[in-house]
Image: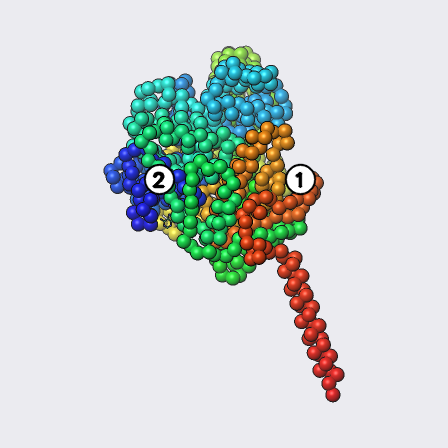
Amino acid sequence: MSGLNLAQQEAVNYLHGPCLVLAGAGSGKTRVITHKIARLIQAGLEGKRIAAITFTNKAAAEMRERAKALIGREAKDLLICTFHALGVRMMRQDGQVLGLKPQFSILDADDVTGILKDAGGTTDAATARSWQWTISAWKNSGLNAAQALAQAKDDNERVIATIMQRYEERLTAYQSVDFDDLIGMPLKLLRDFPEVREKWQKHLGHVLVDEYQDTNATQYELLKLMVGERGRFTAVGDDDQSIYGWRGATLDNLRKLPQDFPTLKVIKLEQNYRSTSAILRAANNVIQPNPKLFPKTLFSELGEGEPVRVVDCDNEEHEAERAVARIQSIRANGLGKEWKDFAILYRANHQARVLEQALRKAQIPYKVSGGQSFFDRAEIRDLCAWLRLWVNNDDDPAFLRAVTTPKRGIGHQTLGSLGVFASQYKLSLFEALFSSSLPSVLNARALGSLQEFGRFVNDLEYRARHTSGAEDAKTFLADWLKDIGYEKHLYDGEENEKVAAARWTNVLEFCDWMAGRCGGQIDDAAGVATATERKTLLEVAQTIALLSTISEREKDQNVVTLSTLHASKGLEWPHVVLAGVVEGMLPFKPDEDAPADSLLQRIQEERRLMYVGITRAQRSLVVSWSKKRKKGREMVAAQPSRFIAEMALDKATVKEDPREKLKALRAEFAKKSAEAAAAAAAASNAP
Ligand code: ATP
Ligand code: MG
């Protein structure tokens, strides 16, 4: 109980009923979760019966580390993961009742776009993506294609519902699921199959949910079914930090909790342990105009600290240089010692580019989080297609990618005939390979190469199923890459050798990382061996689609973080620069024709986003904006965000205009040199 205040202790000690911790940023909500895990173990609950749900994989990895520091080895049994990863586990164990094989594949957003293009007969990715949004929204509100069709309001919706129907059929045929299914299907499992529900309710002794304010309606339903009437759960959240409304998150989940669980214990935390009073005041001022779901106050005992600074810049390059200069000056003054003490946060991914350039020029190491994910790189997606095929032979999109990458002399014509044959006999492409009627539609050579590919995949799959532990996995993966000639494929396909080398490095990094996840005896950098749970390569491969970054590696890197505001949630840094705080970016320019009430909600969510940004800072905060910003290819004039005024900073102390300062310095310099010249002249004129 050391390191917890009284309210936190109360939350940690309340073990047997539903509990909601509702509190502002930096008040120790996440800390309550990690300590409560330790408390539950101490009270005799087995680690494997505790589920802690985080918002990202990265947050899960961090929480596991913290839990390990508190309880040691037992942390390895804990179920700490996102809602989606928990969904995978439930579906793998019990999905058969829904007609799903334990080895199903998880499609990523790109696969889904591809399938929708096909199902809707378009070549336009943007159109397919807009369908994707609508279908996803339907799925998240619990509708299937038939229900969506019945409820469709206009022709457009009817068309999309029909496409959704075809889309669902294909997913079933491919034995594949999309991200929304990872919540929707477990929900169906627990709702419609009482024996499955009872099993999970009995199994889960306590469920803890971090960032509860950003759960959506289906996640809430799932939570309710998981904990049952007894409601042994702890949810922690902050209504002022709900920033995923655009993805279906709803504050209704907070409102409903006291009604659905009348014995809910609500605990508020009021002390902020993260930020100085100056930073906290700016945050409180910004969030103040939003309507309050629950009133709360937040104070800090860390002292007033440095004033929050606003930096006006001429353009985005100038702004990036200012951010870099800021980091360098704090380092020079000895206030921030390590690169990892700094973060530059912004609204949208594309804002990172100018900042990256400035950091490179100054030779400052950095990482971009929340940007293009490692798993979106072509070479990684190639390899993932193979993995998916091992996991699930019926995954047709993966089959097509693997059979053609690297090229193995199987042409489009052959694949076309195979496709027609497979759909005629209602087989997956892989199943079709070994059908006794296939020889009637293909020549012997084509048939031979296809079947050889099939046997090769079968063999790999067999070995992946029987390979576990990091060392064996590493050997296996190296052999496989050699067998398919992937390195040569990269160098052949890329004119620039440096680019090919970088891509090959990514491949090796990916394989090392996969091997690491297979557990066993692992030596860390200091040569300390730890034994972790051994997993087979096939088990690891199955969860790959869920992981968006190689997050475990990031945490020891001593580098400056560049991150979108959305991806910065829950994190903290001693020194933060919020860049690009102009009208149109933050708040983001809303659709002009949106109805007024939704505009108001948009601004409220943007204000929460600003609040999240400000409250990431522990000791110093700079908010910068520039008078011009890029909009597409054009440069347009920009105004400082209204949120800068709303921070209500004391203007006398905080305004920092670099040009004014420079002007003053120049004037001072000119004055001094004039004085010196005059003195010199006077001296030389002296008799
Ligand atoms: P957010 O809303 O941003 O997710 P949070 O409420 O989850 O924030 P934490 O991240 O748990 O807050 O805690 C913020 C910081 O305060 C962390 O560095 C944490 O270690 C520290 N902290 C939390 N509680 C205490 C405490 N009782 N004593 C000292 N430090 C604390
Ligand atoms: Mg937190």
Q: Residue at x 50, y 14 (%)?
A: 146
Residue 578: x percent and y percent? 55, 47
Quadrant occupied by the C terminus? bottom right
Residue 113: x percent and y percent? 56, 26
Looking at the image, residue 453 lies above or below residue 288 = above
Say the numbered circle drawn on residue 179.
none
Is label 1 in a helix, a strand or a loop?
A: strand
Q: Does residue 350 appear in this view?
A: no
Q: Name the residue under label 1.
A: 631
| Left or right placement of residue 561 versus residue 78 in this view | right
Q: Residue at x 61, y 48 (%)?
A: 625
Q: Residues within 10 Å of mark 1 (few under 14, many from 20)?
A: few
Looking at the image, residue 550 lies above or below residue 138 = below
Q: Residue at x 32, y 26 (%)?
A: 228
Q: Does residue 268 appear in this view?
A: yes
On whether ligand 1 comes within 8 Å of the CB at mark 1, the answer is no
Asked where in the image residue 8 lies, by quadrant, the reply is top left
Looking at this view, is 605 or 106 the one in front? 605
Measure the alpha-carbon separation of dots 1 and 2. Answer: 45 Å
| Left or right placement of residue 499 versus residue 31 in this view | right
Residue 512: x percent and y percent? 45, 41
**Type of residue at label 2?**
Ile
Q: Which comes before the other along the chain, label 1 or label 2? A: 2
Q: Mark 2 points at which residue?
A: 267
On whether ligand 1 comes within 8 Å of the CB at mark 2, the answer is no
Q: Which residue lies furthest to the bottom in this view?
A: 687
**Type of residue at label 1?**
Lys
